């Protein structure tokens, strides 16, 4: 098994997004068969706990307790943003506006194509580049390699796993095999 930087970064994201696409296909079939409708699944959350009331309306107290559609968006967008950071590119997050399974599939396809088009040489150089993440509590600096392993990949799998959990919670018949995909392929 090769362990080049491209396979351990973009390749991990491509595999996870490809498996997520398969899960969404099963979710579409579930929505059609059960009559629950696409919107019910796309707007589903893992839990309604911790939701703020009042002026904030339906904003979750845990800002990462997003809907299924948002979890899929942030899995794809998080992978794109992570790779852009490694390459030293400035990128503004894309709008989270998908309202159908077709739009989510389009976003996943576009992200997979972007990831497959990355230059392995540029990506390898990015692992040694300093990455700075600015946020409201200050900034965090690390090497690209550390950023990828300690933040980008765990962040990606947070959203992929939460999307899987939402689908399971909504009755979509998924197994660990759906999450892992065909891991025997090289």
Image (cartoon, rainbow, N blue to C red):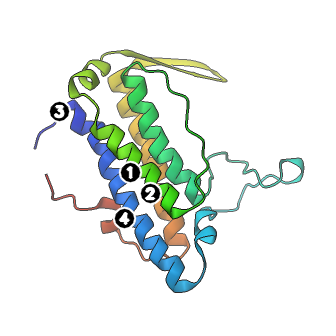
* Label 1 crowd (10 A; few <14 / some 14-19 / many >=20): some
Q: Are marks 2 and 1 in contact (CB under 8 Å)?
A: yes
Numbered disc in front, either 4 or 1 = 1
Q: CA distance from mark 2 to mark 4?
A: 10 Å
Location of mark 4 (residue): 22
**Residue in view at x 23 percent, y 34 percent:** 6
Disc 4 element: helix
| Res. 179 image quadrant | bottom left
According to the image, label 2 marks what residue?
A: 105
Can you identify the residue that label 1 sits on? 109
Mark 2 crowdedness (10 Å alpha carbons): few <14, some 14-19, many ≥20? many
Which of label 1 and label 3 is nearer to you? 1
Q: Which secondary structure lies at badge 3?
A: loop
| Residue 10 shows in the view | yes
Task: Report the number of numbered marks.
Answer: 4
83 vs 2, left or right, is: right
Q: Tell me the distance, in whole angstroms, between the alpha carbons under discs 4 and 3.
A: 26 Å
Disc marking residue 4: 3
Whether 50 is drawn above or below 78: the answer is: below
121 relative to 130 in the view: left or right: left
Secondary structure beneath disc 2? helix
**Mark 1 → mark 3, Cα distance in angstroms:** 23 Å
């Amino acid at each position: 098994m090769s362990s080049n930087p491209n396979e351990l970064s973009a390749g991990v994201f491509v595999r996870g997004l490809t498996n997520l696409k398969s899960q969404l296909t099963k979710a579409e079939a579930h929505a059609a068969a059960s009559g629950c409708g696409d919107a019910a699944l796309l707007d589903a959350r893992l839990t309604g706990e911790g939701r703020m009331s009042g002026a904030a309306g339906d904003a979750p107290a845990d800002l990462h307790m997003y809907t299924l559609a948002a979890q899929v968006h942030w899995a794809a967008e998080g992978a794109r943003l992570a790779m852009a950071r490694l390459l030293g590119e400035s990128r503004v997050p894309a709008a989270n506006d998908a309202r159908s399974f077709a739009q989510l599939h389009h976003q996943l396809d576009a992200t997979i194509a972007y990831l497959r088009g990355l230059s392995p040489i540029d990506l390898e150089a990015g692992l040694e580049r300093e990455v700075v993440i600015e946020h409201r509590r200050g900034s965090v600096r690390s090497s690209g390699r550390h950023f990828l392993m300690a933040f980008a990949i765990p962040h990606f799998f947070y959203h992929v796993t939460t999307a899987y959990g939402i689908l399971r919670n909504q009755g979509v018949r998924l197994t660990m095999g759906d999450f892992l995909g065909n891991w025997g392929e090289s």
